[in-house]
Image: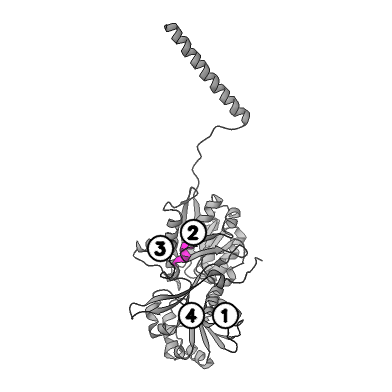
Amino acid sequence: MLQQERTLRLREVVAALTASALLVELVALSGIAPAQAAGPKGPVNVGLIYSKTGALASYGAQYADGFAVGLDYATHGTGTAAGHKIVVTERDDATDAAKAVAAAKELIGQGFKIIGGSTSSGAGTQLAPLAKENNVLFVSGPAATDALTGINRNTFRSGRQTYQDVLTAGTIVGTNLRGKKVVVFAQDSTFGQANVNAVRAVLGGAGGEVSSVLAPPSANDFAPFAQKIKDARPDLLFVAWAGATAPAMWKALDDSGVLGATKVVTGLDQRSTYETLGSAGSKLSFLSHYFYQAPKNKVNDALIAGLKKQNKVPDIFSADGFVAAQMIVHAIEKADGDDVAKMIPALEGWTFEAPKGRQTVRAADHAMLQPMFVAKLEGKPGSLEPRLLRTVPPGAVAPPVKPFK
């Protein structure tokens, strides 16, 4: 009996060894190697260049805060995309285009393939050519100049552009401006000049006679400019302004009687300016690219909730930062890393839900098609808040296609 059991066990062992040998032979014949555990994926470095200091520091802070919340949202709290840890390195351009370029060159020299930021239009227009020359992905931020659209395939934008502002203004003033005097009051900067050009194209195209009054970005006394505008007797005043001098500018326009003498359209600025507008606030019609009470969707709710944890509420450029993070995470996921040749087509034509609503990266020129808003400031002094009058759909404010050169 014992001998029989030993014989049976021996036969089982031989059979098992034979089966194993056959399996190895089949694997060898099929050319399929035994599965091996995949190694850990390397991190992806992202450089964020924006204005921590300088004239646009408040805008830069809003952008950076929004980016952090957007990164958490887009990665589901993991800080990773497609298994790659996203490592963000920040640099301050101090609202100086030359410093933005120096920071970009430093990061690119360290091997960074993704750059986000540019609070100012001046910085954005300097970084875009650098992105093409070094074949990196550049996702521009609050910089509104139209020049960034269609500049090259390496450059995208997470915010709106000036043409969309002016098209939104067109929905406020109407399309029949024949014989009407339109004056653009802006700073003599890349941003200001872009607004003059867009107003000439849009409102001038509707029959308006467009002229401009430009103030140096360093100006603090706006009485002479207000008088010049008053003397022009415009039917419509379009004001395009950015930075900390806005309160003094609005006071000068109000004190001179300009705001009571003509229709004034401007962009709704950051929340800190609401109260400083004083009596001027109730006399203005506002176009807006974002205020947190306007959109009603889950993504905007996530932005509000994320900033609430920091005892903050979203401001004018918070959504731009959030969207930049969404775009970068999507590009990394589709490319499984930071291969620029794969990230660019991943973003082209992409439609997604953003805090503002549904947005699309137009493949032809990388314009960011998005809804815009028309608003009015309401409430008592000390508690002014914007009220949404209407949402303008993306198609109604889509800028002309500007093919890549």
User: For the point 40% across and 79% down, which residue is it?
Assistant: 377
Mark 4 / mark 2, whichever is N-terminal: 4
The residue wearing badge 2 is 326
Mark 4 / mark 3, whichever is N-terminal: 4
User: For the point 41% across and 83% down, which residue is it?
Assistant: 282
Is residue 92 in view from this perspective?
Answer: no
The type of residue carrying mark 1 is Val
User: Which mark identifies residue 301?
Assistant: 3
The type of residue carrying mark 4 is Thr
Q: Tell me whether circle 1 and circle 3 mark residues in contact (CB < 8 Å).
A: no
The type of residue carrying mark 2 is Gln
The residue wearing badge 4 is 266
Q: Tell me whether circle 4 and circle 2 mark residues in contact (CB < 8 Å).
A: no
Mark 1 vs mark 2, CA separation in Å: 31 Å
Mark 1 / mark 2, whichever is N-terminal: 1
User: What x and y, as percent, mark residue 351?
Assistant: 54, 60
Mark 1 vs mark 4, CA separation in Å: 12 Å
How busy is the neighbourhood of tag 2: few (under 14 within 10 Å), some, or many (20 plus)?
many
Vertical position of residue 191 compared to residue 307: above or below: below
User: What x and y, as percent, mark residue 177?
Assistant: 58, 86
Vertical position of residue 154 compared to residue 382: above or below: above
Q: Tell me whether circle 4 and circle 3 mark residues in contact (CB < 8 Å).
A: no
The residue wearing badge 1 is 199
Vertical position of residue 87 compared to residue 29: above or below: below
How busy is the neighbourhood of tag 4: few (under 14 within 10 Å), some, or many (20 plus)?
many
Is residue 281 in view from this perspective?
Answer: yes
Secondary structure of residue under mark 1: helix
Please provide the residue range marked out in magenta: 317-327
Mark 1 / mark 4, whichever is N-terminal: 1
Q: Tell me whether circle 1 and circle 4 mark residues in contact (CB < 8 Å).
A: no
Secondary structure of residue under mark 3: helix
Decide whether residue 321 is among the magenta residues. Answer: yes
